[in-house]
């Protein structure tokens, strides 16, 4: 089908509408407008009841009209340029260093309050709307919960093509039906799916180019992150840390969908690190890789992070450090071979996935130039590593409340014994299992101000330990967090502005709800994010002063972007949360679910 | 056939054997006997906490899609034997798999979970 709306469906609806009118006899007392279907061929009521069937609702609308500017496909050079070209936003993190920094200087503290709604687009789905849109050639590609992907006119919101993934009803999801966006290269747009496939589309027509299975979802796998495109490969990792999976991340050839390499996140028997998993527990040790990575183009090094070992809250049968869970790894992008690793939370029993956004930043560190990798980890600490060697430089708390551990001189946690899960827990432990920051959303970095902006949850929990029963494809968690602060209604949120080279928190913007939306920083000195009570928010990047807020719908869980097209400047931010996760975090739950993309435009002076 | 289904006849046979041996003569189920043993209830709680309670069944009323198990409303029968069958065999078409044959200490662990549920349920007019 090459039309946006299949004609057969329109006809079917017209017949259905006329049939319904005839059957219900509405015409006897009313004078409704005649339906579009030819009256001469309209069936009588009894016939209509027999021949009219509900049309099958399409799930894929392609495009056969010229769209875009005629530009060729996305090149490696354009991916390397990242957001330095304000007409494009090609990567989840904006650029390969993941800074989510827009060079648009006109988005200033003075101007941002003048943002006006340009267009709004509904996703038609419930659940968290976590995507970061991609913009190229005047076209926006955005995904929604339940794996819909839309190609839209970036200036008007007009729909070019759409694909709704037909998903099975027995998905293995831990935390909602989320997707965080597409990857793009050449004329190919790619989306990973909740049933663990990677699907490629022609960027102009929306036709499927290939569809490959990453893993059997029935074994506990799902994929939620945006494919990370490097050197004509789409790199994507799996979720499933709550299902006892064997974690990995893959590289796929963008042109063919053929898998180039797979990197398992845990060692197998006999491999280095296998002795960090007692009882061969790496066979169901989780350690997923469900977020996007970073890439140092000069060194040609890929950075990827991993999630929690399983079972989450009972580590008795997996004694040891559980490599390479909760870690960051440097890898050869051509082979997936690991160069070095750093583990943030050895033998994690709190669900502190180590896979929050990593930022690559060259900095002056105590008077010396350092090519650094920094991360506000889910465990509540902000880390600075030397990304050329993996050497630990320092860690410091970025939250107001961190008590599960301190970090020693080598970067290893010194765990507070009261913080470990217990059968009858009574210790309020901070942060809770969601973090801190979380891999489900982004931060941003302003290289001029040398500040990292981290939206976070301030909510502590008690951790209950139990007996896990292992069954393939089933939850395997070994305990549960007791949401103490949420129950006591003391959970809150903040956006933390962290000095990139010292870890000092320069300012905090506080919100009554835990924060769970992503961040965008602009060269004009603004930070844009969103709140779980449904507002887009703009802050002064230097001070944290609230500059502007606007009701965009439900709770904001998306990753905002900025771009220019047709000479105008736009900011896009999605709204829509999942009540279950909002309740678990202590956020607003009384706003109805439903995804909405709101795009603002900066008026001309 | 899943493991739970395979073990359904075994579970039924165990129930029948228990009754034949007199354990049911007073209307007591194995869960009732375990309910009198604090260590058994404690183990039932640990299994519930570690396997049933994190993202599926909650131990407090909230808006999860999995049923809350401490009230007196049962979708698949509320007698001890019916609850046992649900745990052992699962519920087709749902995320509830059968745990028959998967528990570390066999069928007794299922009864211990039921004992934990029974000893912590809310007050119900017709509760057994």
Image: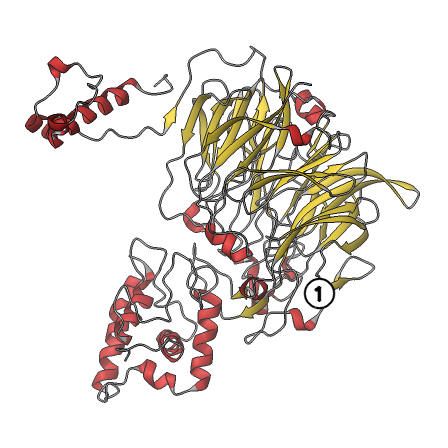
Q: Is residue A445 above or below residue A581?
A: above
Could you tell me which residue is drawn at 34 percent across and 21 percent down? A5
Q: Is residue A103 above or below residue B58?
A: above
Identify the coloring.
secondary structure
x, y percentage for residue A98?
Answer: 69, 36
Q: Is residue B24 shown left or right of residue B71? A: left
x, y percentage for residue A201?
Answer: 47, 25
- Secondary structure under tag 1 reads loop
Q: Dot 1 corresponds to which residue?
A: A403
The N terminus of chain A: image quadrant: top left
Q: Is residue A555 visible?
A: yes
Q: Is residue A333 shown left or right of residue B49? A: right
The C terminus of chain A: image quadrant: top right
x, y percentage for residue A121?
Answer: 47, 29
| Mark 1, other Cα within 10 Å: few <14 / some 14–19 / many ≥20 | some
Q: Is residue B123 above or below residue A259?
A: below
Could you tell me which residue is drawn at 42 percent across and 13 percent down? A64
Q: Quadrant of residue A558?
A: top right
Could you tell me which residue is drawn at 46 percent across and 53 percent down? A580
Q: Quadrant of residue B1?
A: bottom left
Q: Quadrant of residue A104?
A: top right
Question: Chain letter of disc 1?
Answer: A
């Amino acid at each position: 089908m090459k039309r946006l709306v299949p004609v057969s469906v329109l006809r079917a609806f017209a017949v259905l509408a006329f049939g319904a009118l005839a059957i219900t006899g509405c015409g006897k007392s009313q004078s409704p407008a005649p339906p579009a279907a030819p009256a001469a061929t309209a069936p009588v009521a009894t016939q209509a009841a027999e021949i009219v069937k509900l049309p099958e609702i399409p799930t894929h609308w392609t495009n056969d009209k010229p769209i875009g500017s005629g530009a060729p496909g996305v090149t490696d050079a354009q991916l390397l340029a990242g957001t330095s070209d304000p007409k494009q936003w090609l990567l989840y993190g904006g650029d390969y260093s993941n800074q989510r920094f827009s060079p648009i200087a006109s988005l200033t503290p003075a101007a941002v309050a003048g943002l006006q709604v340009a267009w709004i687009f509904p996703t038609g789905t419930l659940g968290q709307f976590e995507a970061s849109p991609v913009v190229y050639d005047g076209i926006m590609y955005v995904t929604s919960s339940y794996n819909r992907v839309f190609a839209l006119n970036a200036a008007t919101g007009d729909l070019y093509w759409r694909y709704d993934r037909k998903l099975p009803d027995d998905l293995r999801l831990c935390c909602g039906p989320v997707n965080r966006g597409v990857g793009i290269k050449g004329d190919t747009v790619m989306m990973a799916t909740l049933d663990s496939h990677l699907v490629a589309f022609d960027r102009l027509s929306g036709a499927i180019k290939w569809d490959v299975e990453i893993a059997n979802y029935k074994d506990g796998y799902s994929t939620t992150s945006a494919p990370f495109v490097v050197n004509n490969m789409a790199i994507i990792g799996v979720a499933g840390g709550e299902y006892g999976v064997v974690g990995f991340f893959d590289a796929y050839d963008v042109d063919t969908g053929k898998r180039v390499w797979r990197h398992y996140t845990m060692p197998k028997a006999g491999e280095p690190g296998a002795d960090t998993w007692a009882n061969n527990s790496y066979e169901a040790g989780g350690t997923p890789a469900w977020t996007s990575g970073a890439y140092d183009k000069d060194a040609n090094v890929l950075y990827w992070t991993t999630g929690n070992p399983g079972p989450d809250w009972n580590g008795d049968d997996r004694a040891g450090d559980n490599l390479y869970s909760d870690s960051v790894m440097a890898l050869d992008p051509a082979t997936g071979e690991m160069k070095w690793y750093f583990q943030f939370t050895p033998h994690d029993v709190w669900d502190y996935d180590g896979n929050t956004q990593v930022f690559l930043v060259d900095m002056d560190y105590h008077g010396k130039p350092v090519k650094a990798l920094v991360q506000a980890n889910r465990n509540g600490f902000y880390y600075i590593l030397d990304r050329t060697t993996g050497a630990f430089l320092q860690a410091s708390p970025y939250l107001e409340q961190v008590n599960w551990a301190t970090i020693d001189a080598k970067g290893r946690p010194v765990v507070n014994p009261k913080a470990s899960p217990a059968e009858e827990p009574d210790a309020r432990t901070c942060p809770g299992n969601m973090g801190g920051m979380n891999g489900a959303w982004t931060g941003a970095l302003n290289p001029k101000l040398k500040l990292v902006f981290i939206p976070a949850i301030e909510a502590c929990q008690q951790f209950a330990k139990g007996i896990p029963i292992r069954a393939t494809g089933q939850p395997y968690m070994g305990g549960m967090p007791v949401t103490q602060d949420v129950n006591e209604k003391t959970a809150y949120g903040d956006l933390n502005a962290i000095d990139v080279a010292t870890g000092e928190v320069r300012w905090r913007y506080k919100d009554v709800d835990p924060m769970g939306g992503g961040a965008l920083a602009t060269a004009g000195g603004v930070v844009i994010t969103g709140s779980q009570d449904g507002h887009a928010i703009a802050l002064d990047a230097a001070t944290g002063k609230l500059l502007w807020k606007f009701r965009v719908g439900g709770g904001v869980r998306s990753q905002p972007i900025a771009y220019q097209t047709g000479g105008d400047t736009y900011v896009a931010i999605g709204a829509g949360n999942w009540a279950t996760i909002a309740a678990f975090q202590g956020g607003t739950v009384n706003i109805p679910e439903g995804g909405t993309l709101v795009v603002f435009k900066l008026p001309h002076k | 056939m899943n493991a739970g289904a395979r073990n359904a006849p075994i579970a039924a046979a165990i129930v029948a054997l228990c009754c034949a041996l007199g354990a049911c003569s007073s209307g007591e189920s194995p869960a009732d006997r375990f309910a009198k043993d604090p260590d058994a209830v404690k183990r039932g709680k640990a299994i519930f906490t570690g396997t049933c309670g994190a993202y599926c069944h909650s131990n407090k009323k909230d808006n999860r899609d999995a049923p809350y198990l401490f009230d007196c409303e049962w979708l698949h029968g509320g007698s001890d034997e019916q609850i046992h069958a649900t745990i052992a065999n699962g519920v087709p078409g749902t995320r509830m798999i059968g745990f028959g044959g998967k528990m570390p200490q066999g069928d007794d662990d299922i009864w211990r979970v039921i004992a934990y549920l029974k000893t912590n349920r809310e007050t119900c007019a017709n509760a057994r």
